[in-house]
Amino acid sequence: MFYLVCYDISDNRVRYRVVKALKGFGSRVQKSVFECPDLTEKQLLDLQDKIEALIDHGTDSVHYFRLCKACLREVEWTGLGRKPAVDLFRVV
């Protein structure tokens, strides 16, 4: 499944660790946004567990947006950027 992961993390060290964890699952498209195009349910749960152990639940936030293939085809953007990797999308 395709996930868009967005975060707002106040501590630089924690943010670096979260970025490092996310790089194992997807690619960075903006400073605090990652596209994870081919996550299984187990991989998503593993990623969430890693991030949950790192963040401060009182100040930080992480959002996981699941996008279907039809939704990905409708993505729009302005300026620099690229279309999400719909070809990498796998239906699970």
Image: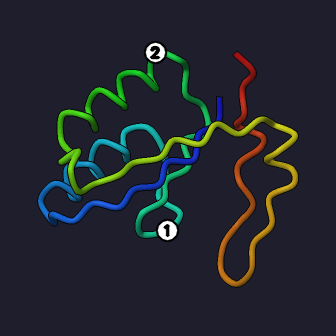
Measure the C-alpha gap from mark 2 to mark 1. 25 Å
Counting from the top left corner in percent of width and height, residue 36 is at: 54, 41
Label 2: how many Cα within 10 Å (few below 14, some 14–19, many 20+): few
For the residues bearing labels 2 and 1, Cβ distance under 8 angstroms:
no
Residue 16 left/right relative to 36: left
For marks 2 and 1, the one nearer the N-term is 1
x and y percent of residue 80 in the render? 65, 80
Q: Amino acid at mark 1?
A: Gln
Q: Position of residue 63 (x, y in %)?
A: 47, 46
The amino acid on which the numbered mark 2 sits, given as a three-letter code, is Lys
64 vs 14, left or right, is right
* Residue 17: x %, y % from top left: 19, 50
The mark tally for this picture is: 2
Residue 13 numbered mark, or none? none
Q: Mark on residue 42?
A: 2
* Position of residue 40 in the picture relative to residue 16 (left or right): right
State the residue at coordinates (37%, 44%). 22
**Residue 30: image tag:** 1
Quarter of the picture containing the C terminus is top right
- Residue furthest to the left: 13
Query: Image quadrant of residue 87?
Result: top right
Q: Nearer the viewer, residue 88 or 30?
A: 30
Residue appearing at x 28%, y 38% in the figure: 51
**Quarter of the image with the N terminus in it:** top right
- What SS does tag 1 mark? strand
**Callout 2: SS:** helix
Q: Is residue 49 above or below residue 64?
A: above
- State the residue at coordinates (15%, 63%): 11
